[in-house]
Amino acid sequence: MRRLEGRDKSRARGFTLMEILVVLAIIGIVSAGVLLSLNLTGRDPQLKTAGRRLLALMHYCRDQAELQTRNYGIVFEPHTYQFVVYSVRGNLWRAVTEDEALRKRTLPAGLSFQVIVDARRIVLHSHKHPAALIPQVMIYSDGELSSFKITLVRKRTGRAITIEQNQDGKIIEKALARHGA
């Protein structure tokens, strides 16, 4: 009887290997959940999607400018953008209404624009009147573009995607990175 009592006491003093492994697994699962919820893994699907959409629309608009021999532009506000076309008849820029793909778009919550044109940062503000639709980025009828650098930024994490024209005249997207890096 004495021997059994001794064994029971030794088991009661520590944790089994199985118990320790279960605790470690729980800690690992909770840590992974926290990392994913905070986007510390470097992934930001909304930012990536918004950047790719803008890039694709810019390519599409450039093609339309060449096909229609019309000057287009992009008007950026802090959280929205829209494509405009130059009306020779009215001698003004107007929102594109005949092409649904080039409609006004709003960025997902938490994202904003920073725009640099001709090496100067542009202060973005909301346009209340259609007459104020003057594009910051120009897409000319011959396919040329004004010099620009458009950065989509998630303020909370500092993650950003930049779209700009390279030396060959192609519109490119720079990979997801920390803004200012």
Image (spheres, rainbow, N blue to C red):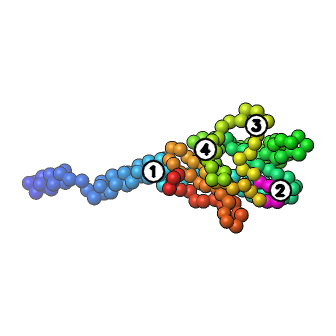
Q: Which residue is mark 3?
A: 132
Label 2: few (<14), some or many (≥20) within 10 Å? some
In the rendered structure, the answer to whether residue 7 lies left or right of residue 66 reads left
Mark 4 or mark 3, which is nearer to you? Answer: 3
Q: Nearer the viewer, residue 29 or 51?
A: 51
Task: State the mark number for residue 4.
Answer: none
Judged from the image, the secondary structure of the residue bearing numbered disc 4 is: strand
Category of crowding for the residue at label 3, using alpha-carbon neighbours closer than 10 angstroms: few (below 14), some (14–19), many (at least 20): few
Camera-near label (1 vs 4) is 4
**Residue matched to label 4:** 112
Callout 4 touching callout 3 (CB < 8 Å): no
Whichever of callouts 1 and 4 sits on the residue coming sooner in the sequence is 1
Lower sequence index among marks 4 and 3: 4
Counting residues from the N terminus, which is met first, the one under dot 3 or under dot 1? 1
CA separation in Å, label 4 and label 2: 28 Å
Where residue 95 appears, as percent x and y from the top left, is 80, 42
